[in-house]
Each structure stands twice: as C-alpha cells, then as structure tokens.
Amino acid sequence: MSLLPLNLLRYLIVCRVNAPMVWFSIYPGLEFSLILGSLIAESLPTVQARPWKKAMLPWQAYGGISAIKKKALRIVPDAAWPIESVLFCYPGKKAYGEGEPIFLEMKLIGESADHAHFLEVILPALEKSGSSIDRTRQTPNALWGKFDIQSIFAARGPVWEPFVENGRLDLHYKPTPSQWSEGLDFHSNARRPLRLLKWITPFDLAPHETVEDKRKSSNRITLDEVPSLRDILGAFMARMNGLSTGKRGASTRFWDILDEADRQAFEAATAAASRVQMKHGSFQRVSGLRPGRWFGRQEFSPIPEIVRPYLGLASIFHIGAHTHFGCGTFVLF
C-alpha cells in the first residue's frame, strides 16, 4: 500500500521526574489529555480557544483539571482534542521516583500534522504542565509541576531524531508529515512466522456501544467481541476513513484516494486474513478508570506476509474507540 496519503508526525517526549515521588491518579493518557488540553484552552486567544474549550466540556462534570483528584471515573469522557491526535503513554508504572523517565508518544495526524502548531501551542503547554500548575487542583503527589522535559524526538521511519536535548530546542529542525514512513519495513525477518498479537493498550472495536451497555458488560469477553484478524484490518480501514485526507473536501474518505492497485492489495490482504484462525486468546476486562474495554493477547495460525504491513500501520495509527488516549495498539511476535 502506498503510504503517501497518510500524514503523520510522531513525537517521543521524555519527561524526567524532579520530585521524590509522583503517581497517576487516572489512566496516564487521560491525565495528559486533560491537563495539556485545559492549559491550551486557557492560553489561546478567544477565537482559537473556542474549539479547545468545547472539547474540554465533558470534563466539567468531573471538575475539569480537578478530575485528577478523584478516586474514580464513572465513565471515560468523550473528550478528544479538536485536532487529530494520539497521546500514547508507554506502558509503565503508576508511581515514579525522582529521576525516572516517563515516555509519551504524541501523534499528530492528517491535516493536524503541523510541526509549527506543536512548537507554538502544544510544547508551551507541556512546559507549563511540568513547571507550574495550581496545586489546589491536584493531589499532593500528582505529576504536574514536578517534571522536566529532557528530550523530544521525531520519527523518521524506525529512527528517532532528537530536536530537544537536555531541555534545549533546535529551531532549525523541521520534520515533515511524510518522514515517519521513510525506511519502514513491516515484513518479518524472523525465522519463525508471526503468530502472537499482544494488545499493549486497552482496545474496544465496538465503539457503537452505549454507555449503559458498557456498564452492564460482563467481565468475560464474548465470542462476538474477540477480534479476528479480518476485524482488525476492517478497524484499520475504518480508522483511516475517519481521518482527514486534505483531498477534495472534508468528506473524502481515505479509501477514495487510494489507486486501484492499493485497493486490490488491501482486499487481497483482507481475504488472506479471513483464512487465519485464532488458536488461543486471553483477555481481561479493564476497570472503569481506563478507556477501552479489554487487554489481552491472541495466538493465530501463521500470519501471511501480505497482511503484516496493514497490521503494522494499524498499530501505529491505533484502532477502535478512544484512540486519542492511546487505546487500540499492539505488538506482533
């Protein structure tokens, strides 16, 4: 598949804790989204702030930034930023000591893949969240106001290029929205075929489900909820079709801008995925404090080579519900 229609900026942000102990009260992706989104909404001029303030409205039921003082969320707010973005906090601990790093990958997608916007709007909010924040709106051991930005990298294919080192910003570095794909190779060089898929963030491939349905959901996954390999490819294409393409108006789907060869290649991969059987699956229900619904791992019969590039893309762009909070990504092995 041609990767040219996919605009993406991937940033890896390394935050270094500068307090004796900090911890996340709620799911890390939620905290980063709430704090940074609120600070951005407070800092922008009135007209520019309007979509950010609207996006933060669902948090008002929990007290806005003060939501991080709560012990539980009844339900994860539908409060994605007004730009196409993913806040993927790398799996780690709940509590961190002084000097320990916290890794956040921020992804700006489609028409939102704008490095200038990152430098002018998002980075200042990140700096403020690390250096100063109203202590009355958080728990004593919250992360906010207690970390330094050590480094920031931008992805060029499989390589991370630094443009912030030891807190110093290189203004001459200007990543492009297409460099993320340079040199990427999703084909396996392993001696054994790939069979295992591990979800490293919660997933929910049934986002049409209502809040009431989710509350009534069992702690055991049903057969209908277990994603097949074909379901994962379908969720990937649904994700792509939901992103802005910047082509011929906002209603143009990703599928519409693919050439015939790319469409046929994806259809062939989907047909191949349909023949792959799941041998074993192990899933756990996530708590109400987290977005998504399930954690787990799946073992399949050997995954065909034709399918792997699409799985690789799905893992980068995330699939299903709550992708903004980092849900819906996995690793293959």
Image: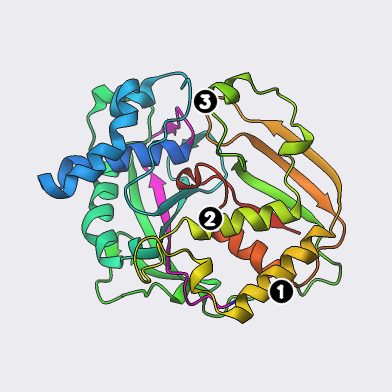
Eyeballing the image, is 301 above or below 67?
below
Which tag, 1 or 3, sits closer to the chain's start? Answer: 1
Q: Amino acid at mark 1?
A: His
Model colouring: rainbow
Q: Dot 3 lies on which element? A: helix
**Residue ID at (65%, 66%):** 310
Q: Would residue 129 be found to the left or right of residue 5 on screen?
A: left
Q: Which residue is mark 2?
A: 239
Q: Which residue is mark 3?
A: 211
Q: What is the x, y in percent for residue 31?
A: 40, 36
Q: What is the x, y in percent for residue 105?
A: 46, 55
Tell me the CA gap for discs 3 and 2: 21 Å
Q: Which residue is mark 1?
A: 187
**Nearer to us in this view, 60 or 270:** 270
Q: Dot 1 lies on which element? A: loop
The quadrant the C terminus occupies is bottom right
**Residue ID at (45%, 27%):** 25
Which marked residue is nearer to the observer: mark 2 or mark 1?
A: 2
Eyeballing the image, is 235 above or below 139?
below
Which marked residue is nearer to the observer: mark 1 or mark 3?
A: 3
Q: Would residue 321 be found to the left or right of residue 295 on screen?
A: left
> Is residue 145 in view?
no
Q: Around disc 1, counting alpha carbons within 10 Å, would you say few (fewer than 14), some (14 to 19), or many (20 or more)? A: few
Find the magenta span and give its range.
Answer: 2-27
The quarter of the picture where residue 237 lies is bottom right
Q: Around disc 2, counting alpha carbons within 10 Å, would you say few (fewer than 14), some (14 to 19), or many (20 or more)? A: some
The quarter of the picture where residue 177 lies is bottom left
